[in-house]
Image: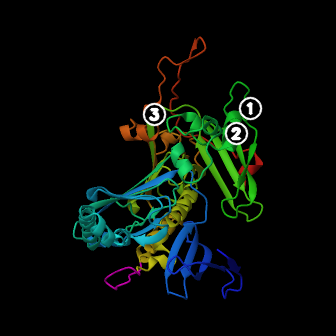
């Protein structure tokens, strides 16, 4: 990298004179910082050498590393599945179990491609040194040739079905769901907490304890990275002996996720009448005006989960208060729509506001159905059908439900931690939602997988003592819905 040129025809494009790795003369690298709609910030890089004609393209993520890693597992059963678009970051590992083949991180650079493109690129890279292998080590060369032939058959769709696993500890990779907004039965997405070694691999700073030890041990809790700001806030909020943080606002610094300007998140612990304790968090950026808020359930873990079903029959039902925790899932059977736990986070809103959030989440979670990426340029049939039509029709149905044009409909909120509820109508004087004929509340036993996802199988409370006193673990009984919900007294929750 020798020289930077700011005289490009496009003011957003940066041109840098850099070394050509093919002829070892100088070529031009063009950089463009852009944002994929409803996804993340990207840095597009394009190199071209005027001397030898060599060119190369690359995609790098310009945004933040996500809080958790992500693992996409997709089962490919028909030739059309090979056209699924894939966003792959530099840190992602791709595995094909049936082929016993793995593409390690940083071997195929970050790019936007398809499943077929991943297989073809892998075969191309393996074949680059094949002539040398056959000359020096014929046995190894024959084995590699078999792998290349298998990759070609997989890419052409001759070996269906097979599985692709995309594991990205940075959380910036994505596999297209062609059936969006309907749930894809062939695609499973898991989010996980990174190990300390994975934090180090993606460039995050090790903990102070790991630096002092001189090594990283994934099994040591002291080596697990944490956010210092959040830890400090938790210490204040949950110190029940001092009762600090209750009915008072705690502020800690945080950068705006839209413009990056430093701001502050306000947090408060409060009690909802006739329900339970909740934690309210809100962020307001003074630079770009971005606002966000979140509600998390407090208190102990109840012995059973809770499923609340609302039969909305009039526009008044759209104004009912809804508390949805980050552990709750939502479904609307009439639309054949289901959102898994964690899709929207925790929020306190109305039924109408919840429908608005669901629509926004569908747009953000399916980047390939909007804008230029909706055109199937890679379709080998040449039909280039737009994928956005089906999504637009579904979003219009959801908009009609929000506006009260589709009545009645059913809203189901299933929460394994029983931290969610749907309130009564605002003109209802009965006060108790158990007497509401439009609301059905059911308690249920959590499944093994739900307990596993919540980490309950890893909790050991037997013979647990502090000092000489034995600690008794209290299990909180779920309390159903408030009779009334007053406005929160603190200024940061308004607006």
Is tag 2's residue or tag 1's residue first in the polypeptide sequence?
2
Q: Secondary structure at mark 1?
A: loop
Considering depth in this image, is 218 or 53 the residue closer to the camera? 53
Callouts 2 and 3 close, C-beta under 8 Å: no
Q: Residues within 10 Å of mark 3 (few under 14, many from 20)?
A: few
Please name which of the two marks, 2 or 1, marks the residue nearer to the observer.
2
The residue that mark 3 highlights is 456
Mark identifier at residue 244: 1
Considering depth in this image, is 298 or 43 the residue closer to the camera? 43
Q: Is residue 278 above or below residue 365?
A: above
Residue at left offset 74%, top offset 59%: 285
- Image quadrant for the N terminus? bottom right
The residue that mark 2 highlights is 233
Segment tinted magenta in the rendering: 377-386
Is tag 3's residue or tag 1's residue first in the polypeptide sequence?
1
Q: Is residue 322 above or below residue 483?
A: below
Residue 74 locus on image (x, y percent): 35, 60
Q: Is residue 33 above or below residue 143?
A: below
Q: Secondary structure at mark 2?
A: helix
Q: Residues within 10 Å of mark 1 (few under 14, many from 20)?
A: some
Instruction: Name the dominant secondary structure of the magenta segment.
Output: loop
Is tag 2's residue or tag 3's residue first in the polypeptide sequence?
2
């Amino acid at each position: 990298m020798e020289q930077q040129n700011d005289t490009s025809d496009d003011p957003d494009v940066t041109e840098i004179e850099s070394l050509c790795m093919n002829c070892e003369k100088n070529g031009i690298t063009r950089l463009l910082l852009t944002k994929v709609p409803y996804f993340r910030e990207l840095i597009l890089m394009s190199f071209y050498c005027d001397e030898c004609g060599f060119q190369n393209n690359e995609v790098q993520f310009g945004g933040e590393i996500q809080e958790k890693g992500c693992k996409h597992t997709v089962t490919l059963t028909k030739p059309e599945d090979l056209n699924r678009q894939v966003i792959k970051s530099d840190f992602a590992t791709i595995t094909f179990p049936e082929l016993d083949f793995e593409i390690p991180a940083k071997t195929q650079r970050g790019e936007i491609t398809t499943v077929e493109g991943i297989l073809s690129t892998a075969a191309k890279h393996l074949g680059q040194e094949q002539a040398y292998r056959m000359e020096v080590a014929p046995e190894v060369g024959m084995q590699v040739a078999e792998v290349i032939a298998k990759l070609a058959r997989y890419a052409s769709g001759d070996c269906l079905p097979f599985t692709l696993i995309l594991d990205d500890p940075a959380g910036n990779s994505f596999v297209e769901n062609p059936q969006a907004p309907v749930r894809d039965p062939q695609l499973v997405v898991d989010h996980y907490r990174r190990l300390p070694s994975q934090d180090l691999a993606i460039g995050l700073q090790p903990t102070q304890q790991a630096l002092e030890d001189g090594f990283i041990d994934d099994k040591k809790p002291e080596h697990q990275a944490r956010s210092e700001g959040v830890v400090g806030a938790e210490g204040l909020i949950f110190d029940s002996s001092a009762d600090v943080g209750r009915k008072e606002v705690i502020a800690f610094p945080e950068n705006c996720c839209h413009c990056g300007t430093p701001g502050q998140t306000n947090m408060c612990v409060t009690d909802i009448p006739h329900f339970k304790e909740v934690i309210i968090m809100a962020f307001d950026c003074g630079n770009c005006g971005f606002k966000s808020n979140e509600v998390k359930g407090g208190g102990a873990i109840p012995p059973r989960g809770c499923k609340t079903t609302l039969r909305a029959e009039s526009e008044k039902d759209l104004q009912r208060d809804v508390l949805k925790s980050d552990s709750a899932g939502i479904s609307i059977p009439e639309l054949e729509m289901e959102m898994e736990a964690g899709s929207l986070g925790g929020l306190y809103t109305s039924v109408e506001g919840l429908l608005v959030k669901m629509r926004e989440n569908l747009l953000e979670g399916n980047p390939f159905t909007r804008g230029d990426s909706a055109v199937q340029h890679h379709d080998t049939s040449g039909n280039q059908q737009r994928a956005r039509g089906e999504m637009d029709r579904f979003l219009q149905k959801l908009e009609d439900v929000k506006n009260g044009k589709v009545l009645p409909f059913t809203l189901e909120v299933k929460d394994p931690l029983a931290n969610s509820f749907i309130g009564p109508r605002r003109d209802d004087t009965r006060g108790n939602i158990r007497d509401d004929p439009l609301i059905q509340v059911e308690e249920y036993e959590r499944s093994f997988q739900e307990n596993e996802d919540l980490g309950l199988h890893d909790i050991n409370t037997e013979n647990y003592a502090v000092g000489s006193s034995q600690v008794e673990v209290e299990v909180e009984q779920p309390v159903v819905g408030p009779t009334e919900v007053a406005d929160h007294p603190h200024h940061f929750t308004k607006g």
